[in-house]
Amino acid sequence: MHLSLQNFTNLVEGMAAAVQGAATSLLDLTVGSVLRAILEANASLALWLQWLIVQVLATTRLATSTGSDCDSFGADFGFLRLPAVAATGNVTFSRFSPSVAAFIPVGTNLSTSDNSQGFAVIANTANPVFNAALSGYNLAAGIASLTVPAAATTAGTAGNVQPDSISVVASAIAGVDTVTNAQAFAGGVNAESDAAFRARFGNYLAGLSKATNAAIGSAIEGIQQGLSYVIDENINQMGAAQMGHFVVTVDDGSGAPPAALVASVQQIVGAIRPVGSSFAVQGPVVLQADVSMTLTSQAGVSHQIVVATVAGAVEDYIDGLSVGATLNYTRLAQLAYDASSAVTNVSAVLLNGGTSDLVPPLFGAVRPGTVTVS
């Protein structure tokens, strides 16, 4: 359906022409006349009705809906917008005198130096010093520091802070003096955008009632944002041929997806897989990318700020590579130039000590190792 929209002037002119054409004598349609005032009032009502029609047309089609209208459209099909994801990383608690034992409880609140972003310590039952009964981490006497996992208290990209950004312990801990994050926090994603929602909805409909790669991929994408995956058919986890078996390699950007995420993928794939087939779900084989480069920056600009900006951009890019994606060597210099206009030259660029592209192995993903920018 095509709606021909008109503005106020066109409406008044059309009305005036129609009224004058039906009259036997010349009408007074000058500014301020009674008849013109009536026509202008009707034109205003017509504009309002036209706007209502446009709103109805926009909200009855997903392609033109926005915000809550997208959500209500998708809800009719059991299709929901993916929520924001909180950034995660590791923080290191230190003390000046390790003479006594200390305890770091789960939920300990932390923040950046300007208090703009909040974080909290989370549980890691695999950590040997984690105390499940007390829900926290034991810092034994004689140990000067302890590294534990933490997550942003507010989900979204704002939690993806750079190294050494977290420095405040909001609630004092006896026997602990400082906190910092040696590496950047990553994985924070904002709530799904309208454009991404529409694109995923199309894949969702295309995959209904079909045991295909597209259907399995659509189901995986519906678990949470920021996932990448590869589906390898007729092969087992050892890389040997096995007809009727497929392997799903999934990652959340960390290189080590949590067991709960792998279990969720296992469950959703099991509900869609072709009858008679078998499958396995696993995290990626991580290939670390050690990057080093030397920058030349413009005079009058803080070189340290430029270095930190470039290092963060390189780490973010590598973190964002999908499972199976190659890290191109020449991309590294481009990342440095794009990260800051103050970069005038990039030299001595090395990727794992060489100048070749980094190709992940079967079921592999490239993730950042040591990024050295000077």
Image: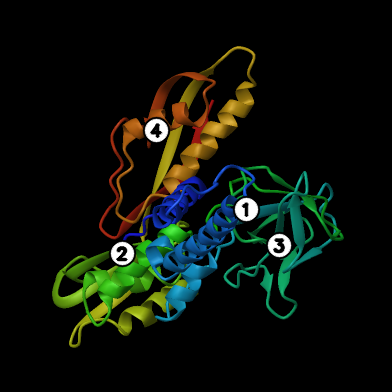
Q: Quadrant of residue 285?
A: bottom left
Q: Earlier in the sequence, mark 3 or mark 1?
A: 1
Comparing labels 4 and 2, the label whose residue is closer to the camera: 2
Per the image, the residue denoted by label 1 is: 34
> Dot 3 lies on which element?
strand
Tell me which residue sits at (50%, 45%) in the image: 9
Answer above or below: position of 165 versus 237.
above
Comparing labels 2 and 3, the label whose residue is closer to the camera: 2
Answer above or below: position of 302 versus 278.
above
Mark 4–mark 3 Cα distance, whole angstroms, equals 33 Å
Q: Amino acid at mark 1?
A: Val
Q: Position of residue 330 (x, y in %)?
A: 33, 31
Per the image, the residue denoted by label 2 is: 1
Q: Position of residue 112 (x, y in %)?
A: 73, 48
> Dot 1 lies on which element?
helix
Per the image, the residue denoted by label 4 is: 332
Determine if residue 9 is in view: yes
Q: Position of residue 180 (x, y in %)?
A: 71, 47
User: Which label is found at residue 120?
Assistant: 3
**How crowded is the residue under tag 2: few (<14 C-alpha within 10 Å), some, or many (20+)?**
few
Q: Amino acid at mark 4?
A: Leu
**How crowded is the residue under tag 4: few (<14 C-alpha within 10 Å), some, or many (20+)?**
many
Q: Amino acid at mark 2?
A: Met
Mark 3–mark 1 Cα distance, whole angstroms, equals 70 Å
The quarter of the rendered structure image containing the C terminus is: top right
